[in-house]
Image (spheres, rainbow, N blue to C red):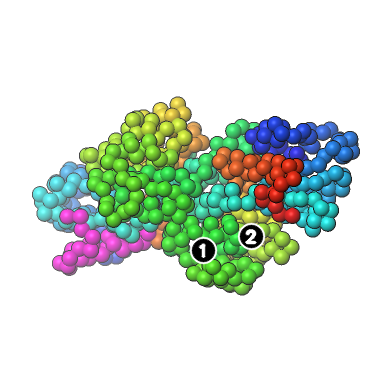
Amino acid sequence: MTKPIYSYLQAELEKRFKVLKLWEAQDGSRFLEDHNQIIRAVVSDGGTGLSPELMAALPKLEIVSSFSVGMDKIDLGKCKEKGIRVSNTPDVLTDDVADLAIGLTLAVLRKLPASDRYVRSGMWKKALYCEMLLYFQFSGKSVGIVGLGRIGQAIATRAEGFGCKISYHSRTPKPESSNYTYYPSVVDLAAHSDILVVACALTNETRHIINREVIDALGPRGVLVNIARGATVDEPELVSALVEGRLGGAGLDVFENEPNVPEQLIELDEKVVLAPHAGSGTEETRKGMADLVVGNLVAHFEGKELLTPVV
Amino acid sequence: MYSYLEQELQSRFNLFKLWQQPPSKIPEFLKSNQRTIKAVVSNARVGADAQLIDSLPNLEIVASFSVGFDKIDLKRCEEKGIRVTNTPDVLTDDVADLGIALILAVLRKICPCDGFVRSGKWKDGDFGIVTFPCFLLQFSSKPVGIVGLGRIGSAIAKRAQAFGCSISYHSRTQKPLKHYKYYDNIVDLAKNCSILVVACSLTDETRHIVNREVIDALGPRGILINVGRGAHVDEPELVSALLEGRLAGAGLDVYEDEPEVPDPLLRLDNVLLLPHVGSDTVETCNSMADLVLANLEAHFNSRPLPTPVI
């Protein structure tokens, strides 16, 4: 294991395998050297993945089982070359991530943290009617989704329950989603959306797909929600847009350099809602993800088909 | 008062601003203006009680900037032939949205997470994922129980269904057109759901409808959401259940004695406390204001009222 991920996961792994904890080693490279003949599998998460150095240090590596759906920190091409299997945890976390996308959207539009603080601080007793906090409606608004994969589709389904109009951008249009409007350009999608949700995988093409042009198209009443990867958004541009009022608000679960968050975002505590990459962080889902990680490893070592292979 | 409404009232009528009077001066103020006051514009919190109504002999209409009229003495108004109007429908979506927002925010601890990041603690470690049992709970597919399946309750049901939730409800009578599971008593409803949402109107029958028995039936993994009226819930029982861990969490937009909120709640991170903002979006406040104005204009032009209560 590259890092402590989840106690239930670790316990389940320890029941079945010899688990070597990389983070406990005083000297990581030495530790790997000492054990590189016996390490056949790596368990990691979305944020850490499998670094090139780690891959190079483990000649007997057969499989990487990732506690995530995101694969941006694993060189899949290299793994394929070397015959290393890779598995992730799709589907089990789709609902939770989609729930958080809607949760963040509502939290931004209805200023939940600021309103909760208004009550807890005693301000409500002093001023019954707070016109300083402007709340905006969610129902019926236009929601634009960048990436209509499992998670994007789940977000669309939920937003439809609120009477929202759905449009999307992806590499290619999805014929099965013909009731949603497709925009080949993200800028056009943003221009036609009140709320823009980033739900795509991080690839070379989607790095900084949300740039200044897109943010300006979304506009001063627009809200950006990111539950994908921090790097899909040009973070300095996002920050300056929020500070200057060129963007109405943002709900962010991911950042370019987690767990570091730009100081100006910390200061904007009414129009911005922040979460610590908790998209899949419910008890139910974490357990489901852990079971998949373990299940994939067990399948591999029993010579069976992987449950959720990527490579 | 909502500034847009205040401005419009001021430009169309002679507006007396009671909230600007110190409480002790109110009777005097009303007495000196009682001949000319023909309408009262009120809201959910203040209403119009018998005392106010009696002190305005020429009162013809009470137009409330709310859908709830539990604080208006309807009986007295009816006796005196005073019309009463409210603002139904325009706020249904917003209140339903807030119901779902409260559910998501409580289960996923959205506000504590936001605070966690802002405090810098994220740099020290994961939000409870590693250090203690992760107590963030899933919303999707959970059974949702709704108390009161009126406009707002139905709108909440529709939204929750989009998250794959199964819907059950309790109300005075079963609604044949709604294909959700009906429970003729609220304790059974609470036993069979993880999320209990109060969305009924406040009447004598529904006062404290959520009591200790209901809360215990909802249980230590259940959460209570209230977008109805504070008086629907036995507040001291709710507080003790939360403190003792007999209830997992609560999302509240209303309280028994607003703006007073029980002190112990202010220190809990498994509750979300909002200052009665269910319908407070810019869009809806404008629509509600327009409806108040439309009711007043209709009355004074002897036209049928758009949204009369009586």
**Residue B257: percent from left, percent from top:** 33, 37
Main secondary structure along the magenta-highlighted residues? helix
Front-lying residue, A222 or A182: A182
Q: Kindly identify the amino acid type of the residue bearing the numbered disc 1.
A: Val
In the displayed structure, would residue B273 be above or below residue A132? above
**Residue B191: percent from left, percent from top:** 38, 36
In the displayed structure, would residue B264 be above or below residue B226? above
Within 10 angstroms of label 1, few (less than 14), some, or many (20 or more) residues?
many
In the displayed structure, would residue A234 be above or below residue B220? below
Q: Secondary structure at mark 2?
A: loop
Query: Is residue A233 visible in this depiction of the protein?
Result: yes
Within 10 angstroms of label 2, few (less than 14), some, or many (20 or more) residues?
many
Chain that bears disc 1 = A
Q: Secondary structure at mark 1?
A: strand
Q: Which residue is mark 2?
A: A200
The numbered mark at residue B274 is: none
Q: Is residue B193 left or right of residue A98?
A: left
Query: Is residue B130 visible in this depiction of the protein?
Result: no
Task: Determine the residue positioned at 83% across, 50% down.
Answer: A52
The numbered mark at residue A143 is: 1
Cα separation, mark 1 vs mark 2, equals 15 Å
Q: Are marks 1 and 2 on the same chain?
A: yes
Q: Residue furthest top?
A: B244
**Residue B86: percent from left, percent from top:** 25, 55
Task: Determine the residue positioned at 40% across, 40% down.
Answer: B193
Task: Determine the residue positioned at 37% across, 32% down.
Answer: B217
Start-end of magenta stretch = B284-310
Front-lying residue, B1 or B191: B191
